[in-house]
Image (spheres, rainbow, N blue to C red):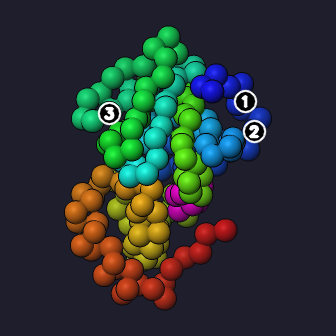
Amino acid sequence: MWYRRWMTATQPRTHDPVHRVSMAFEREGDGLWVTTWLDPGGELPEHLHPSLDERWEVVDGVADVKVAGEWRHLDAADGPVMVARGVRHALRNSGAAQAHLRTWVTPAGGLEAFLCESAWAAQEGLYDARNLPRGLRGAAWIADFALRYRDETVMCSPPPALQRAVLPVVARLTRGRLPRFG
């Protein structure tokens, strides 16, 4: 069911300072509710999910969503936007106020763990806004992280073809330098 009580600011959140986004999670059956707060200038960079479907909706404020190469301006009156598995998509807040969004993800898979670990790595300074590593520890983490989640979430920068060629080599070369999440 798409209608759901709105998650409030008092729920636990994970915060990604690099992309200026906070999130809260609630599992329901085989799906996952992700409530997202995008600060002005905040974004979820372009990515795709090979095995997950999403339904995004603006709860409060405005946001821009890019689906299959086309940007669209959204507010609460626009209703949900479907993002099928395998489709590239991104979100950004180009407004002056925080945007509050929610998404229904099916199946839930490991998306919550992916987003929490990514936020942790942002707090640790392991990568930059272009998703590029900062230093050897960042390279070790990104290689390991991207390989572990490649069946669920693929970032589009750097290009996926380059990631497929380089990440296994980087993971092998940096194995002993891997920072630990949690």
- Kindly identify the residue that appears in the image at 45 percent across and 73 percent down: 144
The x, y position of residue 170, in whole percent, is 34, 79
Task: Please identify the quarter of the rendering in which residue 69 is found.
Answer: top left
Tell me which segment is drawn in magenta.
114-121
For the residue marked with disc 3, what is the amino acid?
A: Val
For residue 8, the mark is 1
For the residue pair 3 and 143, the one nearer the viewer reads as 3
Q: CA distance from mark 3 to mark 1?
A: 27 Å
Q: Which residue is mark 2?
A: 11
- Kindly identify the residue that appears in the image at 27 percent across and 36 percent down: 68
Mark 3 or 2, closer to the camera: 3
SS for dot 2: loop
Main SS category, magenta section: helix
- Mark sitting earlier along the chain (3/2): 2
Q: Which residue is mark 3?
A: 67
Q: Are marks 2 and 1 in contact (CB under 8 Å)?
A: yes
Q: CA distance from mark 3 to mark 2?
A: 29 Å
Q: Are marks 3 and 1 in contact (CB under 8 Å)?
A: no
